[in-house]
Amino acid sequence: MIDINAYEGTPEAEFRDFVALLKPRVMSLVVFTAFVGLWVAPVDVHPFIAFCSVLFIALGGGASGALNMWYDADIDAVMRRTQGRPIPSGRIDGSSALALGLILAGFSVMMLGLAANWFAAGFLAFTIFFYAVVYTIWLKRWTPQNIVIGGAAGAFPPMIGWACATGGISLESLLMFALVFFWTPPHFWALALFMKSDYHAAKVPMLTVTHGRPATRRHIFAYTLVLAPFAIWLGLTSVGGPVYLAASVVLNALFIHGGWQILRRSEDAAIADGYAVEKRVFKLSLNYLFLHFVALLVQNWLGAW
Ligand code: HEM
Ligand SMILES: CC(C)=CCC/C(C)=C/CC/C(C)=C/COP(=O)(O)OP(=O)(O)O
């Protein structure tokens, strides 16, 4: 019998494939942190300028996602989680993704410079470079500290937002950076614990692969402990207040408890329940970060210290 599917040729790229190249789900939280950084800054920004700034940061983030997918296509083709992405599945060729990434990167930086200021635009350019080149091309395939150092790229957006409003850097924006920076390792390693075989197959030196799961569990717990003081310190600055502080204390207690549970678990127990705790802590990590930034917004609305 003739298999007509074998004669379909290269699958057609659809609009949603180009959108997928921009990693919209991950970037939605990144962009939210940038928005909050801009909004809580002590300078009034015209709503239209604020809207444009966030839009161009989002486009810049998307550009870096496309550049990451272009370079990582070989890794993505091996891992089950990423095999369906537009490049490994053949719906978009690498050179189109590269072109899209470069054009969007240039466009977003130029437009942010015109809409906000050139310091913020330079910061956005540096962040795109950091994710696409420092993390993706260099660190990711080289060291298990890849996501710790490379995580800085994901932590810059609230500083970019702040820079859009103020044209500079402050203790508050540095602490927002620290919040995302020290959050990234437990966020990612919780996921890596239930994805180890994928990274192993793709020969990516994630901590789970190079140092094993017990070491990864210890690292997750340690980072939840390091993270908490920075998150709470932010609440003592000019953007903080009682609502943020209360939220942060509760969220950190939950996150540290999650890290502790991960630390105490044996691998056999994790296999037995299908990594339920690790999956729960990964989800908790997303809520942890989202709610910290929501708390900053609410505090700003109610009035900070
Ligand atoms: C080097 C740093 C990071 C690494 C290696 C990392 C890795 C990952 C991976 C592998 C996933 C799961 C699959 C996926 O959706 O692609 C994920 C999910 C997610 N990450 Fe991260 N992440 C990092 C930083 C960040 C940052 C800075 C943010 C936001 C501020 C973020 C937000 C998210 C969100 C929202 C999801 C869920 C996506 C969904 O619902 O599909 N991540 N992350
Ligand atoms: C404004 C701006 C430029 C923002 C950039 C923000 C940024 C660096 C986000 C990184 C988050 C992310 C998707 C990491 C995934 O790592 P991976 O690429 O190793 O994960 P994968 O295996 O899912 O591809």
Image: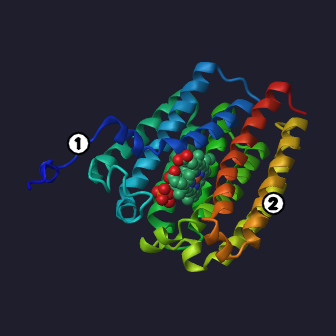
Looking at the picture, tell me which residue is in the foreground, 180 or 283. Answer: 283
Q: Secondary structure at mark 1?
A: loop
Q: For residue 103, which numbered disc appears in the image?
A: none
> 242 above or below 180?
above
Q: Is residue 220 left or right of residue 108?
A: right
Corner quadrant of residue 21? top left
> 131 above or below 269?
above
Q: Which residue is mark 2?
A: 257
**Residue lying at 70% horizontally and 76% vertically, measured from the top left:** 266
Q: Position of residue 208 (x, y in %)?
A: 58, 73
Report the amino acid beneath label 2. His
Looking at the picture, tell me which residue is in the foreground, 260 or 1. Answer: 1
Looking at the picture, tell me which residue is in the foreground, 7 or 32. Answer: 7
**Residue lying at 58% horizontally and 30% vertically, measured from the top left:** 116
> 96 above or below 166?
below
- The quadrant the C terminus occupies is top right
Badge 1: how crowded within 10 Å, few (<14), some, or many (20+)? Answer: few
Q: Position of residue 151 (x, y in %)?
A: 60, 58
Q: For residue 12, which numbered disc appears in the image?
A: 1
For this orientation, the residue located farthest to the front is 1
